[in-house]
Image (cartoon, coloured by chain):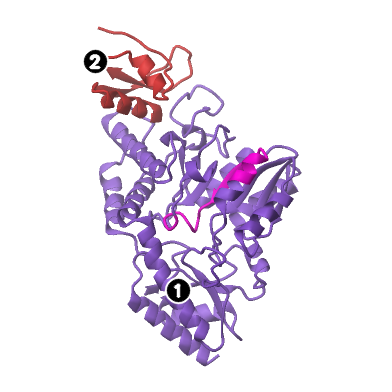
Amino acid sequence: MTYAIKAKNVLQRYGMHAQIHKTAGTGRNEGCAYSVTVQNPQLNVGELLRREGVAVGEMKWVE
Amino acid sequence: MIYFDNAATTYPKPQAVLRALNTAVVRYGANPGRAGHRLAVETAEQVYNARKTVAQFFDMEPCENVIFTKNCTEALNIVIKGLAKRGGHFLCSDLEHNAVVRPLESLRQRGICSWSTAAVGETDEETVENFRKALQPNTVAVICTGASNVFGEVLPIRALASLAHRNGAYMVVDAAQCAGVLPISMRKDGIDFLCAPGHKGLYGIMGTGVLLCNCEAVLAPLIQGGTGVLSALLTQPDAYPERLESGTVNVPGVLTVAEGVKFVEKKGVSQIYKAEMKHILHIGSALSEMRNVELYTDLTSGKKAYVPLLSFNVRGLHSEETAERLSKADIAVRAGLHCAPFAHKAYKTQSCGTVRICPSAFTGQKDVNSLLNSIFQIAKNA
């Protein structure tokens, strides 16, 4: 949760609306996790988060 | 009640802290970092903001390296046992609290690590030299109180950190008596691990503490358990803070610490120090003129810096007897060894302990006058 909040704060600082969700499980079967969704990203979100010190486990693009 | 036992825990707490406590219980009642519903996320965001407040206050980043603990002792145990490795050595000052020396002694008795002390000298230069001589090739960390919890003397943290780093050791600071009254910059002071109570100079409620990690070392966790993430794994997550925060976080406590830090920031650390030091200098000056009173904290020598607290005894009375008589006048102080037998050994006061006086941001001149009048009466009749 800590890093999901950190990610959300970073995205909001860059003017993007982000939301935190509990994730059923990651592809690596490591159990509980949190994810952050962002609509209409203005920037390369993965790169931005990594640059701000947020480790990104997985990324998904949905309609 | 006239309260001078603020070195044990500050009392009263600021109104804003009490409001934060109420808000935490009433409004942020969900478990942070476990579920995904709105209240759980909102509560987790409050805890995250508290980490940011604490990190900023001690000039450290990132904020996820702020670990919330139940007190300073737990924070020190996490660092000491988390850094311990077989054959390693720890070096600490001879003024340390049992929160430092007991975990060290426990490691020694289990055959894991050795430890030794360096004497705090008459001057900072002498202290640094004593530490330099006591360092060993296998010294893992220098652990040092920021200021003695019994006599108030401030230790040269920045110089000791520099010394530790030159010898490949970490610098660990027990900030129990200096957090909130002395400016601390983990970045500038070179502190790798800072342990502080949330309920003393930071004005949070009791049962709170913080550990700030400002280096690459990944501490072994003291306890293992639920973290809300990576729950399919049998091992603790690597990432802070979850790695070191198993189990439900004390949300009401955490939010009071953040509010307490804001209170200190608003008043100003230097202003708090100045106001409290004014009281202590007044008390010290008055006690030095009283017959039958022995003052151990030499505030006027100019050789050392002090935090605003002092220790004294009334000649012919055990420290506990003096404290008992003050208690009858409804004045709260602490007597005895203050969980710091090494400090008393260094000052040769281990047989009867000392009476410790510590003001807070809420202490007034009237409180000081009442205290002095009571001590005067006790000393006169001793």
Q: Is residue B331 left or right of residue B100?
A: left
Q: Is residue B78 left or right of residue A4?
A: right
Residue type, label 1? Leu
What letter labels the chain drawn in red?
A
Q: Is residue A22 left or right of residue B381?
A: left
Q: Residue at horizontal 51%, vertical 53%? A: B175
From the viewer's side, name the closer residue of A12 and B16.
A12
Q: Residue at horizontal 51%, vertical 87%? A: B290
Residue type, label 2? Gln
Location of residue A39 (image quadrant): top left
Q: Secondary structure at mark 2?
A: loop
Q: Is residue B26 left or right of residue B67?
A: left
- Look at the picture and state if A23 lies above or below B241: above
Residue B281, numbered circle: 1
Chain label for disc 1: B
Q: Which residue is mark 2?
A: A39
Q: What's the magenta region?
A: B162-182
Q: Residue at horizontal 57%, vertical 36%? A: B221
The magenta stretch spans residue B169: yes
Q: Quadrant of the N terminus of chain B?
A: bottom left
What color was chain B assigned in the picture?
purple
Q: Quadrant of the C terminus of chain B?
A: bottom right
